Amino acid sequence: MQVYIVGGAVRDALLGLPAGDRDWVVVGATPEAMSARGFVPVGGDFPVFLHPVTKEEYALARTERKSGRGYQGFTFYTGADVSLADDLRRRDLTVNAIAQTPQGQLVDPLNGLADIQARVLRHVGDAFVEDPVRLLRLARFAARFTDFSIASETQVLAQRLVADGEVDALVPERVWREVTKGLMSAHPARMFEVLRDTGALPRVMPGFVFDGNLAGRLVCAASNGLPLPARFALAVLQSPSPESLARHMRAPVEVADFCRLLPCVVAWQCGTGQNDAGLPSRADRASPESVLTLIEQADGLRKPDRFQALLQAAACTCQEAQSAMSITQWQACLAKVHDVDAGAVARSCAGRPAEIKTAVRAARLAALEALLV
């Protein structure tokens, strides 16, 4: 039995990047032999085991054969006669098809090291067109490794994946998983560029609008360390129905909420479009009534961190001179509203419960007027 480190850990080490989780491939073993050594099976479609001490993943070397449509249409073979070269040939890109012995010796039958040095993302073989997930991975690797180009022949095969209808077999949850990784990369817009240029974008994200300001918004989000929900909301901001697109992709509720709220915050801050209250002028948008209305709409008192993230995302869409207020001013306003003792106001309305809500809001407006006037 021989073991090798494979995939991303080897690639990133060669690029001088911080080491992430290590994946291992095991050659010459059987599931029974792994279990006998104390490894714990966790795989579904093919045998994957957790090391009894380190808990790292060890997968038996395998080959695959196309047996159906889409990314799940494969039959795997994990016999003890599968070689390391056989296993590496089934991988997506040459930069991900380099193995390393525990002693540090590289095994590189597909010239992945040369492609790393040339900064090229290149498919391993023609089987690339059999798995549509490989197109998603190509797009997100392009977003992560911004100085890598995509080999022209790989671009052709990616377009074939779309033309042959393989991408139509992708389920929204799988698309979401890859898109989230790309969004948290250094240059997220490049992922959408690859999907657009291959024709896959309208198939995997129906209704997505790739507008001219997308790259700038996402670079701003990345440079400011905005969380995933804010980045996705910025990406789909110009799409006809951002919240619906988030739900189509089975995104978490928090992401859908960002998609619903961000257009309103952008309209309020930047004066673009019309929000529900219809206050287009900068002066009106910065009035106590207007400020309190937005805090209420965005549930800013209960979720101040989300409200701040929404304001930071909105700042990625317009110049500071266009903004109704700076984020620091918004923070001061939120603190003023939060400091209003709603319990004391409620007690002052003893015997008149119907007046409590109006009285609390009036107290909050008074606090804002003292700050903003």
Image (spheres, rainbow, N blue to C red):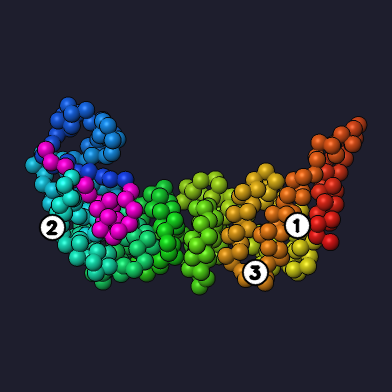
Rendered image: mark on residue 185: none
Which element carries disc 3, helix, strand or loop?
A: helix
Q: Which residue lies at the image location 23% right of the left edge and 62% below the top edge?
A: 123
- Nearer the observer: mark 3 or 1; the answer is 3
Queried whether the magenta region covers residue 10, the answer comes back as: yes
Percent position (x, y) of residue 130? 24, 55
Specify the amino acid type for callout 2: Pro
Residue 45 vs residue 116, the one in the foreground: 116
Residue 275 is left or right of residue 246, and the answer is right
Counting from the top left corner in percent of width and height, residue 219 is at 49, 65
Examine the rendered structure and indicate whether residue 52 appears above or below residue 362.
above
Label 3 vs 1, first from the N-terminus: 1
Q: Which residues are magenta?
A: 1-20
Asked whether residue 201 appears in the rendered view, the answer is no
- Checking the image for residue 320, the label placed there is 3
Compared to residue 147, the image places residue 34 above or below, namely: above
> Residue 362: in sight, yes or no?
yes
The residue at 71%/59% (across/down) is 329
Q: How dense is the environment of label 2, judged by Cα within 10 Å: few (below 14), some, or many (20 and up)?
A: some
Secondary structure of residue under mark 1: helix
Q: Is residue 230 left or right of residue 89?
A: right
- Tell me the quadrant of the picture where the C terminus can be found: bottom right
Q: Would residue 21 appear left or right of 209 to someone viewing this image?
A: left
- Of callouts 2 and 1, which one flags the residue occurring earlier in the amino acid sequence? 2
Q: Is residue 220 magenta?
A: no
> Which residue type does callout 3 highlight?
Glu
Circle 1: residue type:
Val
The residue that mark 1 highlights is 291
Pointer 2: what residue?
Answer: 109
Q: Tell me the quadrant of the picture where the N terminus can be found.
A: top left
Question: Is 29 left, or right, of 134 in this rendering?
Answer: left
